[in-house]
Amino acid sequence: MPSAAAIVAHWAPSLVSMGHFATEKDVNSHCFACKNGCRAPDRAHIISLGDGGGNELENLHLLCRPCHLASEYMSTDRYWEWFGSRDAREGAVIFTADSLLDK
Ligand SMILES: [Zn+2]
């Protein structure tokens, strides 16, 4: 499984060019989908393993826990549709709860 840093390096240019993030620096330590800050995001498959996806960089995104759970059963087109519509507010509530647990 590639490291989180390798996944960021692979995806940052395209996430910026699709307008999802303003700069490549913003991609680091943020959930790719909801864009909330996330120190240890999950590595999530775009094409699920069950649908024949693998552990290549092209098939991995970094997602916060709420986004990973929300996208768990989505694959490919459905995933990208969800990804494009994901909003920071959707991850915010649970992210706040996570932050409280860290203290
Ligand atoms: Zn998220």
Image (cartoon, helix red, strand yellow):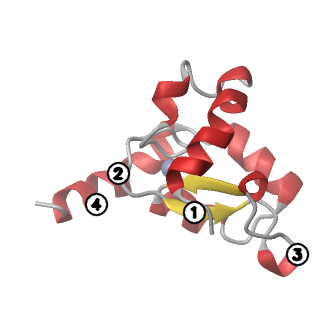
Q: Nearer the viewer, mark 4 or mark 2?
A: 2
- Near mark 1 (Cα within 10 A), the count class, few <14, some 14-19 or many ≥20, is many
Q: Nearer the viewer, mark 3 or mark 4?
A: 3
Q: Answer yes or no: disc 2 within 8 Å of ligand 1.
A: no
Q: Which mark is residue 84?
A: none
Indicate which disc, 3 or 1, sits on the residue closer to the N terminus: 1
- Which residue does the image show at 75% across and 61% down from the upper left? 56
The amino acid at mark 3 is Asp
Q: Which element is circle 3 on? A: helix
Which disc number belongs to residue 98?
A: 4
Q: Which residue is mark 1?
A: 43
- Report helix, strand or loop for mark 4: helix
| Residue linked to disc 2 | 39
Disc 2 residue type (three-letter): Arg
Per the image, label 2 sits on a secondary structure element best described as loop
Judge whether residue 33 can be spotted in this image.
no
4 or 1: mark nearer the eye:
1
| Relative vertical location of residue 1 with respect to residue 80 in this rendering, above or below | below
- Residue 75 lies, in percent from the top left, at 81, 63
Viewer-nearest of discs 3 and 1: 1
